[in-house]
Image (spheres, grey):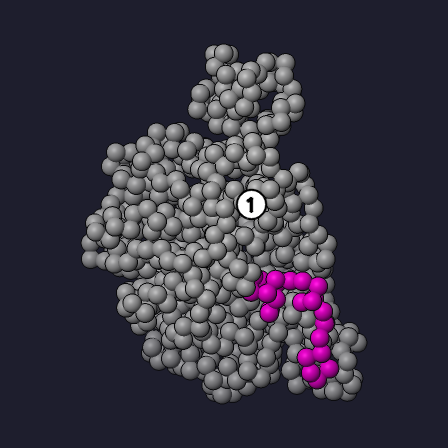
Amino acid sequence: MKHIFKHKRISAIVSVVPREEYRFDDEYPLFKLTDDKARRFKKMIGLDRHRIAPPEVCSSDLCLYGLQQLLKEGTLKREDIGALLFVSQTPDYFAPPTSNVLHGKLGLGPDVVCLDINQGCAGFAVGLMQAFLLLEITALPKVVLLNGDTGSKQVDRCNRISYPLTGDAGSVTIVERCEAENPIYMDVKNDGSRHKAILIPGGAYRTPASPETLVIREVEEGMRQNLHHVSMDGAAIFNFTMEDVPRQVQEVLAFSGDSLDSIEYFLFHQPNAFILQQMAAKMKIPPAKMPNNIVTLYGNSSSTTIPLVISHNYPAEFLRAQHRVCVSGFGVGLAWLTMVMTLGPLTTCRLVEYEPV
Amino acid sequence: MDKTLFYEQMAQILDAEEVKPENVLKDFETWDSLAVLSVMAMADSKFGVAIKADEMRSAVTAADLEKLVEGKLK
Amino acid sequence: MNFTFRRKRISGILTVLPAREQSFVDDMKNFNFPEARSLKLKEVMGYDKHRIVEPSVCVSDLVVFALKHLFEKELLLPDEFDALILVTQSPDYFMPPTSNVIQGRLNLKKDLFCVDINQGCAGFVIGLIQAFLLLEQESIRKVLVVNADVLSRKTSPKDRNSYPLIGDGASITVVERDTVDSVIHANLKMDGTRNNVLMIPAGGFRRPSSPETACLEDVGDNNLRAKDHLHMDGSAVFNFVQVEVPALIADLLQHTGSSIEQVDYFFCHQPNRFMLQKLADKMRIPHAKMPSNVVENFGNSSGVTIPTAIAFNLGDRLIQEKFKVCFAGFGVGLTWGAMLLDLGRVNFNSLIDYA
């Protein structure tokens, strides 16, 4: 479904990663990979290092840290916060919503709208869409979009498929109204008939946590997991990223009247280097326009990968000027959402390391 | 369909000197989930066909994969 | 935050409740408490019977059942809505979103915006606000607000503070554009400093479930519950409702230049009869205008209580007639929100059993 939003813009992005960095070269014996196989994995998936939060750190802690940085430096004023959106698949609690917990920790006023949305890899784009919807309410000053995921808690450290590419991160994106028309073109699609392609079977209400759901099994050599861990159908996901997403990107480019040439950066979710290379090749996007280094340097942190792409690769570019970009998030649901917009200049664009307060 | 290209690509994916049609995929130590994805990607980029996840699962030999790709080309 | 929406209307409400009914008298057997005192609790709070799902039933099961009912009766066509907003605290999975599970089980179109919002007792008002926001988009013509919860599954049967009032259920509310220039006002407030008043301490990522979090503990007054269970601080909730909700409704009425007399019904969230009657008295609202009979008949099913109250108290009358109503939802977060609108001439307003 296509939408156009006008008079909205992103004004600041801060990404937060844990300090703890782990290297694939140190870890691969954990998942029983031979040196040869490890070399193949590393090259193909683009593995090198990833950031993993300590057990006591939740995704909301990473987001809160980033938000406090913005408040401290004065980029964001407390009274300008109109809404706190928390998009995650790793909430603090089933109840209350994590956005309300953060609202309490920040001591915000009663008129701040708190909203928790469960979304994964499409979560940055879904969060932006939600922010744009809320900003149609003129009384609401700015929307603080928090994306946070600690996916490392949803994989076993001895799973060679899921663990080495997973990373934890949080991000804070400030979205506000602007004078300029700045039309944002987007398309959003969902296909629940493929909802099992990326799934955590246990831990919520379908299969509640129990001693049995916690039992770790070695489903294949070097692939340990229990029912609280992500189960992925890699081949089905590959088909999805090679068919549905490119089709949508083409549709949105046509919708906005853009072309591969007019777009300066393709800021895509970062599942792994292999999939992104294939997608770029399929869509004939020059690799230089499509950054593909987040899995290699930080790990795939679900909905925060796009903020990481921006704040790691182009802080100077987006602080200085505006650029025509295509943003695409795709994954669990399945959900896929692509937007074309002019992004920048931002007042803040950086990546920081989390420090426990 | 360019069979030479197909088997060259297969050899590259499986990290083998040569792949023959009768070779059983499971006999290659490198035949794993990554290799499956690589074959799907190769079919797409070199031959312009999309192989579905389910279709891959029934392939036993390299020839089965070749037939799968060829079938899509028609 | 005050909201004003124009040209939007509710065109149908369906509530589905589990057929399984439990009585307070049966619940009492699990309490470690003198029978006479339990019976006193029943009388004061207005507990009698409540609807509880079988232990394997999930939110998507209730919602799929309700939607199939609407499709079969041709009250709704599978491809005529463009967004499915699921508001729940009891999702099927951490991933994927349960709205996608529902979409998949019913083979709904791909051009459907699916979103899972985590909200509780204010979830009906929040869901409606979300629907109105989406309907501002030209491409969206009709939206389903789906409220659903199966919180009985995280409530300790040995906790008198929560179990006897809890109920399960789901509701589908169809929201679309109005042809006349109607106006809907809403007011929404949050206070996260009191986020621990209503909470399930374990099971999320702050404190993952473990054998320890499943252990029943004596939390005082002979009530037993685990960290995996819903915890309600009854007196804090009571205080919250009596202080914040009257101010919220008064503010909304003042803001819109309306009076209590002009409002036909106040459909509030239904924590229990006692609390609602105190609320009505405090605001000088006649009891007849503020139904408080949901908990004693069906239990408190979180965001589903307002649709249940509408279906149970107005039923088919809502197909013919039109009323000025005020909704008020309040609870977990803490979150409290109210809405003033014209409700009526809907296509359906009924209550069905899930079996």
Examine the image and state in which quarter residue A236 appears: top right
Asked if residue A61 shows in the view, the reply is yes
Near mark 1 (Cα within 10 A), the count class, few <14, some 14-19 or many ≥20, is some
Residue at image coords 48%, 33%: A44
Q: What range is drawn magenta here?
A: C200-222
Residue at image coords 53%, 19%: B11
Give C302 or C307, whichever is nearer the viewer. Answer: C302
The N terminus of chain C, quarter of image: bottom left
Instruction: Name the spot of residue C242 as percent of width and height, x first.
Output: 50, 84
Q: Can residue C202 be found in the magenta stretch?
A: yes
Would you place residue A95 above or below residue A208 in this image?
below
Asked if residue A148 shows in the view, the reply is no
Give C262 or B45, whichever is nearer the viewer. Answer: B45
Residue at image coords 38%, 80%: C251
Host chain of mark 1: A
Residue at image coords 50%, 57%: A53
Instruction: Name the spot of residue A72 as percent of width and height, x first.
Output: 32, 69
Would you place residue A306 above or below residue C220 in this image?
above
Q: Can residue C254 be found in the magenta stretch?
A: no
Instruction: Name the spot of residue C346 as percent of width and height, x first.
Output: 48, 60
Instruction: Name the spot of residue C20 as percent of width and height, x first.
Output: 72, 63
Q: Is residue A200 left or right of residue C132?
A: right
Magenta segment main secondary structure: loop
The C terminus of chain C, quarter of image: bottom right
Secondary element under disc 1, as helix, strand or loop, is helix
Would you place residue A1 above or below residue C85 in this image?
above
| Amino acid at pointer 1 | Glu
Give B2 or A152, whichever is nearer the viewer. Answer: A152
What is the total number of numbered labels drawn onto the structure image? Answer: 1
Residue under pointer 1? A27
Q: Is residue A227 left or right of residue A118?
A: right
